[in-house]
Image (spheres, helix red, strand yellow):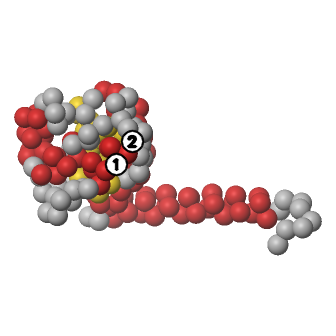
Amino acid sequence: MTPRVGIIMGSKSDWPVMKEAADFLEAMEIPFEIHIVSAHRTPDRMAEYAKGAHTRGIRVIIAGAGGAAHLPGMTASYTHLPVIGVPVRSSNSIDGWDSILSILQMPNGIPVATVALNAAKNAGILAASIVSASDEKLAEKLIKFKAELAEKVLESATELDNLPYTYRR
């Protein structure tokens, strides 16, 4: 199967966070590839990956990075594909804020969609949504997924509604 989503990260230490994107894509049966591509330590590898991703069938790239977090933005500068940045709270991070702001504050012309700190699952969901624009079967899976989320919330609401408090509104 041809991968539709590329998951890249700056180092192996990002994998525990980025695995959540892979797990979601796997559950949705979306083919993907995973690579370690550092914007700072292997810039040529990063550029080659970004420039050639579309030729391999990739439709969207999820890029996770901590610290200075240049990987998502630099990847976006080398490709026309949508890039989703996942800020990762890393050992050299300033509580994750450096990563968030590095990914979020891209200049006009080089957009990067940004999810919350360590929110690789949301990146996987967003990537699936992008791919589903041209895949009706996948769109149906996402509609079902979101309906299940709504059902869980309604079940929780019902549980709270049935608590035996006398003085609640």
The residue shown at (8%, 39%) is: 48
Q: Position of residue 5 (x, y in %)?
A: 26, 47
Q: Which residue is mark 1?
A: 100
Q: Quadrant of the C terminus?
A: bottom right
Dot 1: element: helix
Answer few, some or many: residues within 10 Å of disc 2's Cα (few below 14, many 20 plus, some between 14 and 19). many
Q: Which mark is residue 6?
A: none
Q: Position of residue 13 (x, y in %)?
A: 34, 27
Dot 2: element: loop
- Give the distance between the C-alpha atoms of the residues marked 2 and 1, in whole angstroms: 6 Å
Position of 49 relative to 4 (above/below): above
Position of 52 relative to 44 (above/below): below
- The residue closer to the viewer here, 128 or 160, is 160
Answer few, some or many: residues within 10 Å of disc 1's Cα (few below 14, many 20 plus, some between 14 and 19). many
Q: Position of residue 139 (x, y in %)?
A: 37, 63
Residue 4 shows up from this direction? no
Q: Residue furthest bottom?
A: 169
Q: Residue furthest right?
A: 166
Name the amino acid, label 2: Gly
Q: Is residue 19 left or right of residue 103?
A: right
- The residue closer to the viewer here, 131 or 114, is 114
The residue shown at (12%, 57%) is: 80
Name the amino acid, label 1: Ile
Q: Residue furthest front?
A: 94
The residue shown at (50%, 61%) is: 146
- The residue closer to the viewer here, 108 or 63, is 108
Residue 40, quarter of picture: top left
Q: Position of residue 137 (x, y in %)?
A: 36, 60
The residue shown at (11%, 35%) is: 43
- Contact between labelled residues 1 and 2, with CB atoms less than 8 Å apart: yes
Q: Which residue is mark 2?
A: 96
- The residue closer to the viewer here, 163 or 57, is 163
